[in-house]
Amino acid sequence: MSNFRTPLKNVKGLGSAKEGTSHFWAQRVTAIALVPLVLWLGFSVAALPGMDYVAIREWLSQPFNAIVMILFMITGFYHARLGLQVVIEDYIGAHGPRTVAIIAVNFAAAALGVTGVFSVLRIALAS
């Protein structure tokens, strides 16, 4: 009579935080999504005739390249945020500094992501 857990609760395996599996899967899915995006970026940049500013800007002004670059940046910063959160949770023991560090990582990832997307759009939409 001391076990108040239902069989459904035991099967689902949800812990006290009730979010561990979604974080795990989000990190794995973004890692899988980054594989073709990194390959695309590497081969696309390697195929450029020159590595000067004008060539990169012209390449990034093409709609397909701009869209895929935005997807790469959003996925990359989100994946980095998830990974850094796990590292912070594992290695910072005190609750206060851990919370501050997680909030700082979230703000940094959002700020860098928005800055990157804005930069690509500015290049892509420049006349």
Image (cartoon, rainbow, N blue to C red):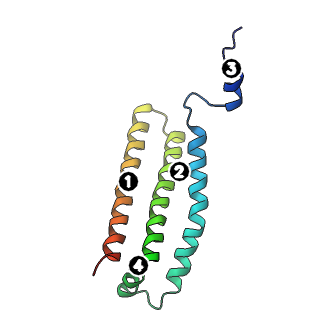
Amino acid of disc 4: Leu
Residues at circles 4 and 3 in contact by the CB criterion of under 8 Å: no
Q: x, y (%) of residue 76? A: 49, 60
Q: Earlier in the sequence, mark 2 or mark 3?
A: 3
Q: Earlier in the sequence, mark 3 or mark 1?
A: 3
- Asked if 124 appears above or below 81 in the picture, the reply is below
Crowd band around label 4 with a 10 angstrom C-alpha radius: few (<14), some (14–19), many (20+): many
Q: Nearer the viewer, residue 80 or 90?
A: 80
Quarter location, residue 59 = bottom left
- In three-dimensional space, the C-alpha distance between marks 1 and 2, rounded to whole angstroms, equals 14 Å
Crowd band around label 1 with a 10 angstrom C-alpha radius: few (<14), some (14–19), many (20+): some
- In three-dimensional space, the C-alpha distance between marks 2 and 3, rounded to whole angstroms, equals 33 Å
Q: Earlier in the sequence, mark 4 or mark 2?
A: 4
Observer-side mark, 2 or 3, equals 3
- In three-dimensional space, the C-alpha distance between marks 3 and 1, rounded to whole angstroms, equals 40 Å
Which residue is at a point 48% across and 39% down the rendered structure image?
92
Observer-side mark, 1 or 2, equals 1
Query: Which residue is denoted by mark 1 in the rendering?
Result: 110
Q: Earlier in the sequence, mark 1 or mark 2?
A: 2
- In three-dimensional space, the C-alpha distance between marks 4 and 3, rounded to whole angstroms, equals 55 Å
Q: Earlier in the sequence, mark 1 or mark 4?
A: 4
- Asked if 113 appears above or below 127 in the picture, the reply is above
Q: x, y (%) of residue 109? A: 40, 54
Question: What is the total number of numbered labels drawn onto the structure image?
Answer: 4
Query: Which residue is denoted by mark 4 in the rendering?
Result: 60
Query: Which residue is denoted by mark 3 in the rendering?
Result: 6
- In three-dimensional space, the C-alpha distance between marks 4 and 2, rounded to whole angstroms, equals 28 Å
Residues at circles 1 and 4 in contact by the CB criterion of under 8 Å: no
